[in-house]
């Protein structure tokens, strides 16, 4: 029995891939994904990419099958794309919903290990982690690694959350848990979207497991990281952390 067949009794696994100007990298990623997990369904969420990524996705769907393409009106952010994709997946009864970047930084060959961890540990969320033992990054400039490690350390300290790579974007959710996270209220974009969903999972009583992966810097296209994304993550994590500590303090006072 395959990993996809073991995750549940519904429609199995769907991999949600948001895209914006990824026409060069998307075909490579999707073909590798199809080889690594042949049974998985794919949903490409394209934000009206000017380079024609949406049409490339449609061509892949016609050629390979089990690929759907969601065309959105414009660039609305990573968080918004994932929420739209999650809603699509939940409405169609998939058991497990996977996040994966189109740019090749998340190696499709490591998805079976992430799915295996979700099954074996009975977790609600399995994260492909760069910062647990065995995890690593390749071809990253030193300042990107410092930024990522620092952001995750700050998140753990501010929010009291034990997850070591809460900003990671390579992950698999059980649909049952994802459906409990009130996705309609998610306003975070950029990379703090990942922290937001991790935090919601933890607060909902979900179990999180981290799986070591190798994160590879993209070879095609340009990074979507920007100063505004970093600042959004900083102020949101600070606000969430302050609210969490305030709740803890009120609990101590009531005792």
Image: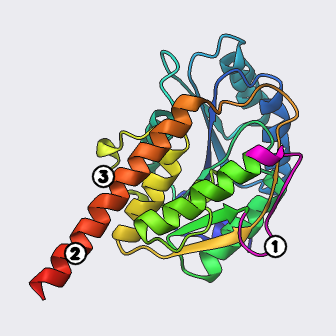
Residue drawn where x is 24% and y is 66% of the image: 246
- Considering only order in the chain, which callout, 1 or 3, is on the residue closer to the N terminus? 1
- Considering only order in the chain, which callout, 3 or 2, is on the residue closer to the N terminus? 3
Q: CA distance from mark 1 to mark 2?
A: 36 Å
Considering the whole magenta stretch, tell me its main secondary structure.
loop
| Left or right of 153, for residue 213 | right
**Which disc, if any, is residue 233?**
none
Would you name the residue on which mark 2 appears?
249
Residue drawn where x is 66% and y is 30% of the image: 224
Would you name the residue on which mark 3 appears?
182
Label 2 Cα crowd, 10 Å radius (few <14 / some 14-19 / many 20+): few
Answer above or below: position of 195 versus 232.
below
Name the quadrant containing residue 245: bottom left
Q: Secondary structure at mark 2?
A: helix
Label 3 Cα crowd, 10 Å radius (few <14 / some 14-19 / many 20+): few
Residue that extends furthest to the left in the rendered view of this protein: 254
Residue drawn where x is 66% and y is 20% of the image: 54
| Left or right of 21, for residue 182 | left
Tell me if residue 24 is in the magenta stretch. Answer: no
Q: Percent from the top left, x then y, of residue 134?
A: 81, 73
Residue 3 in view: no
Q: CA distance from mark 2 to mark 3?
A: 26 Å
**Which disc, if any, is residue 134?**
1
């Amino acid at each position: 029995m395959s990993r996809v067949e073991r995750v549940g009794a519904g429609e199995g696994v769907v991999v949600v891939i948001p895209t914006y100007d990824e026409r060069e990298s998307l075909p490579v990623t999707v073909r590798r994904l199809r080889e690594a997990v042949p049974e998985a369904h794919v949903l490409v969420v394209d934000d009206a990419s000017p380079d024609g990524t949406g049409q490339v996705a449609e061509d892949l769907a016609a050629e390979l099958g089990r690929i759907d393409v969601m065309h959105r009106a414009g660039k609305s952010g990573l968080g918004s794309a994932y929420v739209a994709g999650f809603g699509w997946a939940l409405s169609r009864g998939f058991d497990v919903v996977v996040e994966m970047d189109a740019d090749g930084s998340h190696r499709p060959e490591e998805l079976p290990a992430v799915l295996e961890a979700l099954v074996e540990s009975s977790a609600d969320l399995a994260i492909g982690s760069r910062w647990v033992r065995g995890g690593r990054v390749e071809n990253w400039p030193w300042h990107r690694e410092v930024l990522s490690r620092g952001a995750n350390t700050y998140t753990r300290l501010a929010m009291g959350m034990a997850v070591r790579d809460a900003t990671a974007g390579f992950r698999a959710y059980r649909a049952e848990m994802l459906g409990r996270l009130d996705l309609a209220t998610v306003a975070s974009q950029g990379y703090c979207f990942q922290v937001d969903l991790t935090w919601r999972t933890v607060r909902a009583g979900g179990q999180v497991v981290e799986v070591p992966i190798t994160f590879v810097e993209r070879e095609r296209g340009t990074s979507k990281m920007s100063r505004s994304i970093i600042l959004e993550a900083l102020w949101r994590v600070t606000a969430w952390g302050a609210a969490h500590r305030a709740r803890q303090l009120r609990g101590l006072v009531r005792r």
